[in-house]
Amino acid sequence: MRNSNRKILVNQIGYPLRGNKLVILRGSSSTFHIRDIATSEIVYSAQAQDGVEDLCSGDHLFQGDFSSFEEPGQYRIEDEEGNKSAPFMISEQPYDEVHAGLLKAFYYLRCGEDLDEEYAGVWKHKACHTSPGYVHTNPDQRLDGNGGWHDAGDYGKYVVAGAKALADLMLSWELYSEAFAYSVPLPESDGVLPDVLHECKVELEFLLKMQDTVTGGSYHKLTTKQFPGLDVMPEEDEDELVFAPISATATAASCAVMAVAARIYDTYDAEFADRCLTSAKRSWTWLEAHPDEPGFKNPPDIYTGEYGDGCDLDERYWAATELYFSTGESVYHDAIKGYVQGDFPKCELGWADMGGYGTVRYLLADEQEKDTALYADLKGHLMNEADRLLEISKQDGYGISLMEDDYIWGSNMVVMNRAMLLLLAHKLCGNVEYEQAALGHVHYILGLNVLDLSYVTGFGEHSVMHPHHRPSVGDSVELPVPGMLAGGPNKHLNDECMRAHLQGKPAAACYIDDEDSYAGNEITIYWNSPAVFVFSHWNSA
Ligand code: G3I
Ligand code: 9MR
Ligand code: ZN
């Protein structure tokens, strides 16, 4: 594992021609030069701003702005002391390959089918987790739960996690469909249904199986009782699968994404869209019959990820919103107005706090009539949050909106969720400052960070090589499965590996590229998904 001590940090993929371009200098000189790799000529020189102490990293650094340099090409940046950055490009659309890579990662995470060499290359493997599982609350009952995506570095399939991932991917498609004009390609690619919707269908079909046919509630997750060893390949993980008890958060989150799917698949596949709407309505019936549900807790014999969440008002609010815009029925509009009074964050896009999806839908949808006062209130919430993030980004040495306490398990999801919110604010009001701040978050993810690391496997000169991802550990391939976003710095050091190596580090430096570090270096579907959304913005110009 190489520890980088580069003095000059850049976005290792590159910069859009007309976007803001930032370089960070950590040496003592503040003059920097751009060298054209093709000609070896210096093509631009400038002075970085006065040095700043960055709070989250402890770094003393100079921020250099070369936004005005708009010549396409391949470059490196150098300083007066002879330090050099990684190579990077400036081009109209520098992120098309990363975008396709992030989307393709969902294919690699598929469960229950052979990943053939034709599509998976050296990362091929046989079908996994194809046996029926038993229902924890009724062990004699066996059900088929084949399909969907593995959650992460483990092979569990968790409904709330899948719903967040689907929410981001389907919203990406709705807002940036031009970004998906290419073919990945996938085994299903047919030139009719866009690949991103083929991929989402894999998980939607799985969520349909997670819905109890009798009550309409959704089983919280389908996993083995314990995590398998770290080098166990998917098809070798043959422990019995268990459908964990039904939960309100799973049911409501499934309801919401099914209602979205009902709208967006309608023009391609009306029969599938109908199944999705029927499922959403059955979920809603369950939710109405279960107004006061406790948050999900792992039964004592199940040790896999809990995705516990004591508040289901945000998921219910989101479900009501999606059902309202899919059906136009006032009962859902009334439900939105009720749930929105609840005490939960209105702009969060996490697996636990999902209210932001309801808010975003209410602000962006135009299918049905809206309540003027409610619209104004929600827009106020979103714009206030965007302003807060913008302010922090302007203060931060590395140009992102995270404060010290935001470097938690999956902090890179926080980075991408916030970029998403900034882009949505930009969409709602047109202020380019939000878009610029969002691009700063992209630069951070692709190398402009304390570790000089691209957090996306397979992309960038110095990218994550040892993710906590079982297939990447267990196959005999040196390179990790590509296109996966690692969790990122976590100041709480929630695993042994982090505790052994990172004591006393500043928050933004609490990261190690080690396969044992599950609290910093795992990958998940719902860390990749907001990244797909964000990169879609620059892929659809
Ligand atoms: O947000 C709070 C913060 O306010 C608080 O001060 C701090 C102190 O502990 O914690 C922060 O919460 C953390 C939370 O993630 C933030 O989302 C928790 O500590 C942390 O334990 C929790 O981690 C979750 C982790 O599972 C453990 O439950 C991650 O969000 C979640 O992404 C992760 O999910 C796992 C699945 O269980 C299994 N599959 C892999 C997946 C990724 O690692
Ligand atoms: O590998 C597991 C990972 O996918 C989870 O996110 C993580 C937290 O739930 O747990 C990992 O499993 C570890 C377990 O919790 C403790 N013993 C070591 C396991 C990793 O090898
Ligand atoms: Zn599987």
Image (cartoon, helix red, strand yellow):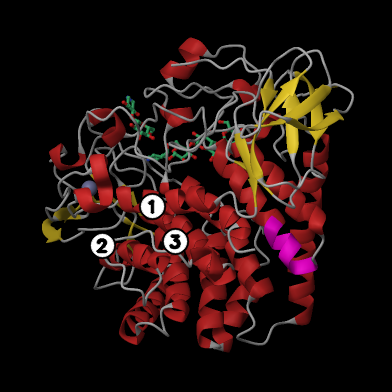
Location of mark 2 (residue): 187
- What residue is drawn where x is 37% and y is 75%? 193
- Which dot, 2 or 3, sits closer to the camera? 2
Q: In this view, does 75 lie above or below 139?
A: above
Question: What is the quadrant of the N terminus in the image?
Answer: top left
**Of 158 and 57, the residue lying toward us:** 57
> Which quadrant holds residue 211?
bottom left
Q: Does the magenta stretch include residue 11?
A: no
Query: Can you give x and y, in whole percent of width and height, for residue 507 in the image?
Result: 64, 23
Mark 1 vs mark 3, CA separation in Å = 14 Å
Q: Are marks 2 and 1 in contact (CB under 8 Å)?
A: no
Residue at the right extreme of this rendering: 50
Which portion, as a residue range, is magenta?
423-429
Query: Can you give x and y, in whole percent of width and height, for residue 249 in the image?
Result: 45, 58
SS for callout 3: helix
Task: Identify the mark at residue 104; answer none if there is no mark.
Answer: 1
Query: Can you give x and y, in whole percent of width and height, for residue 304 in the image?
Result: 31, 38
Q: Which of marks 1 and 3 is nearer the N terminus?
A: 1
Location of mark 3 (residue): 166
Estimate how packed mark 2 is, as few (under 14), some (14 to 19) or many (20 or more) residues with alpha carbons within 10 Å: some
**Of 304 and 498, the residue lying toward us:** 498
Q: What residue type is labelled 3?
A: Leu
Q: Can residue 13 be seen in this view?
A: yes
SS for callout 1: helix
Query: Can you give x and y, in whole percent of width and height, for residue 45 in the image?
Result: 83, 30
